[in-house]
Amino acid sequence: MAIRDGEVLNTIYNLDKEKLMTKPTPTARVAKSMHYLLSRSSLDVSGINLDSVIEPRFVNKLENAGFFEEMNRPYGK
């Protein structure tokens, strides 16, 4: 965003913060949606097994290390 006004940015953030994911865990629903969209423009994508794409390991490592809890503290979520 090109907006530098802190008051405007805080207002935008406060309006949308409940919609933001604090833990971006991959889900089957999102993977299926992306698979559908990508397969329309690339035949290579249509043959991909979605179970091999959904990998929560890295998000789980961050969670176990307390990363999300630490990030939620200053942002009030």
Image: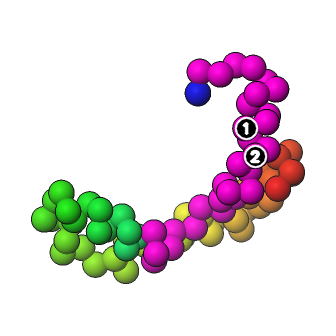
Q: Residues within 10 Å of mark 1 (few under 14, many from 20)?
A: few
Residue 49 as seen in the image, left or right of residue 53: left
The residue type indicated by label 1 comes to Ile
Part of the protein shown in magenta: 2-30
Q: Residues within 10 Å of mark 2 (few under 14, many from 20)?
A: few
Q: In front here: 30 or 73?
A: 30
Residue 2 as seen in the image, left or right of residue 65: left
Q: Is residue 24 inside the magenta stretch?
A: yes
Q: Which mark is residue 38?
A: none
Q: In front here: 1 or 28?
A: 1
Where residue 61 appears, as percent x and y from the top left, is 63, 65
The residue type indicated by label 2 comes to Leu
Q: Is residue 70 inside the magenta stretch?
A: no
Where residue 4 appears, as percent x and y from the top left, is 70, 19
Where residue 69 appears, as percent x and y from the top left, is 80, 59
Q: Residue at x 58, y 27 (%)?
A: 1
Q: Residue at x 50, y 73 (%)?
A: 27
Where residue 2 appears, as percent x and y from the top left, is 59, 21
Q: Secondary structure at mark 1?
A: helix
Residue designated by label 2: 15
Q: Residue at x 71, y 48 (%)?
A: 16
Residue 77 as seen in the image, left or right of residue 37: right
Q: Which mark is residue 12?
A: 1
Residue 70 in sight from this viewpoint: no
What is the number of callouts on the image? Answer: 2
Residue 11 in sight from this viewpoint: yes
In the figure, residue 18 lies in which quadrant? bottom right
Question: Could you tell me which quadrant the C terminus lies in?
Answer: bottom right
Q: Residue at x 86, y 45 (%)?
A: 74
Q: Secondary structure at mark 2?
A: helix
Distance Cα–Cα, label 2 vs label 1: 5 Å
Question: Marks 2 and 1: CB-CB under 8 Å?
Answer: yes
